[in-house]
Amino acid sequence: MSLKGILEIRRTLALRLTLWYAVVFTASSLVAFFVFYVVISNVIQRRTDQELLNDLSEFITILELKGIDAAKTEMDIEAGSDGVGKIFLRLLDPSGREIAASDMSFWKGVGPGRVALRRLIDGESHVFETLALTERPYRARIVYGTVAPEKILQIGVYLEEDARFLAAFREVFMPTMVTIVLFSAFIGWFMARRALSGVGQVTQAAVDISGGAFERRVQVRAKGDEIDKLAQAFNRMLDRIHALVTGMREMTDNIAHDLRSPITRIRGMAEVTLTSGQSLDEYQALAANTIDECDRLLEVINTTLDISEAEAGAGKLKRDRLDLARVLRDACDLFQPVAEDKGIRIISEVPDDCSISGDIRKLQRMVANLLDNALKYTPAQGVVRVSLRGEGERVSLSIRDNGIGISPEDLSHIFERFYRCDQSRSEPGAGLGLSLALAIARAHGGDLRVMSTPGEGSVFTIHLPRSPFSS
Ligand code: ADP
């Protein structure tokens, strides 16, 4: 592996997790090992002490029942039975003078412990001590106990076996620890790599996407874990970005398309007038047409800007106290001549007043757009019904017509900018009216819904809070 590769691994989360895991695992093993060692040492010592106490009480019985001579014989037998130099027994008087003893040739330097004798005289039933022996490698455990009046028995055992057992235990410690460290590092590395493999996938997807693969998504492994949730959130974010980018691209295309037609028309007229036009009238007609087309263009541009402004939210709205019922009545009056021209009846079911707060000019525009559509897409003899209801803190207004209706396929697109259904292309319009109405409703904290049946008519309903700016 190259130096760069090694440096990169050094910075990885996987390595840090592995090290943490190995350190924690090793430290816990060390503590467990230490506690186990202390417990084992104590158990061994307690077992040795218990055996010494058993020997003491055995000699108390022998002295009581059989006398001092039998006790002396028993001391020799006891000392020989465990093997040479393994145990000694010595009978002392309270001053430490030896009365009798087993073979003491292996126990040089072991005298009567003055402190132990003093404690016995002070009333303790028995006293333990651990001694290092001058000529032997292991230590001895000694017990002193009063076995008869003026007689103290000292029993010592050589701790070779116990010490060897604990040494063997210590000897396996190092190799075991090394194995544990290596094993824990391996397991830690394995687990960290497994856990982080999903993060690697997300990173790779992000790299691919920034390299141009915009359709790329992270594979969700259906385990329901944190990585899956990250992948799902990441994919959702990508879908949203994709939808926004596509929407913006479509909108730019639409704007370009909508600007191209009038500009092409203006250019065509100017060219014709320039090449064949002779009279002042023709030049005046050109100027009038150019103004018309420019007005249409300005209308499209201004409405697009109005939609963007409304979509910016409530921040840009005026906060007037207004009567929505009056706004609706005025709109009906305004469109009455158009309706009459088309032979359409406008029925207004609006209460005397309905007070809300909002931006009156924007709300007038929203209502006008919906009413204009209803009249545009309803044939002669049709009926347009405008109704308003206030329900507590919310009001709902609806504009219903019995016109051409909207197909289910178109219904999900009509609120998109520049979208126009095929059947309505003969009517004037740029496909921005509903986008603006929806943006205004939302900016007021409300919503705009539509229900429609082709051939039967449509109903557009707006729900608005009475006080959109109170919170
Ligand atoms: P336009 O300027 O084309 O009316 P809108 O955004 O107001 O743009 O409407 C988008 C499309 O929705 C219209 O082109 C029309 O096809 C359809 N539409 C809107 N209102 C109605 C309605 N009341 N009845 C039938 N179709 C409608």
Image (tube, grey):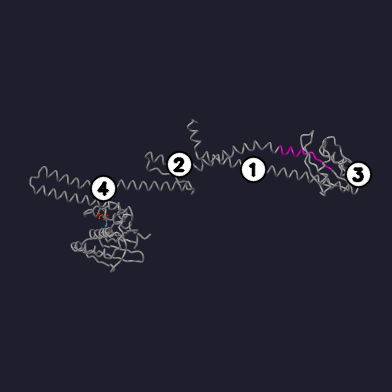
Query: From which residue to which does the magenta span run?
Result: 154-167
Q: Which mark is residue 201?
A: 2
| Mark 3 to mark 1 CA distance (whole Å) | 51 Å
The answer to whether marks 4 and 3 mark residues whose Cβ atoms lie closer than 8 Å is no
The disc, 2 or 1, on the residue closer to the chain's N-terminal end is 1
- Looking at the image, residue 194 sits to the left or right of residue 67; the answer is left
The disc, 3 or 1, on the residue closer to the chain's N-terminal end is 1
Quick one: SS at disc 4?
Answer: helix
Specify the amino acid type for callout 1.
Val
Query: How many residues crowd mark 3 within 10 Å: few (<14), some (14–19), many (20+)?
Result: few
The residue wearing badge 4 is 255
Specify the amino acid type for callout 2.
Gln
Question: Magenta stretch: residue 132 in it?
Answer: no
- Looking at the image, residue 280 sits to the left or right of residue 379; the answer is left
**Residue 107 position within the rendered picture, expressed as x and y whole percent measured from the top left:** 82, 36
Quick one: SS at disc 1?
Answer: helix
Above-or-below relation of 386 to 29: below
| Mark 4 to mark 3 CA distance (whole Å) | 123 Å
| Mark 2 to mark 1 CA distance (whole Å) | 39 Å
View extreme (top): residue: 2
The disc, 4 or 3, on the residue closer to the chain's N-terminal end is 3
Query: How many residues crowd mark 2 within 10 Å: few (<14), some (14–19), many (20+)?
Result: some
Quick one: SS at disc 3?
Answer: helix
Quick one: SS at disc 2?
Answer: helix
Q: For this rendering, which residue is in front, 401 or 355? A: 355
Question: Magenta stretch: residue 158 in it?
Answer: yes
The disc, 4 or 1, on the residue closer to the chain's N-terminal end is 1
Residue at 28% of width from left, 46% of height from top?
252
The residue wearing badge 1 is 31
The residue wearing badge 3 is 70
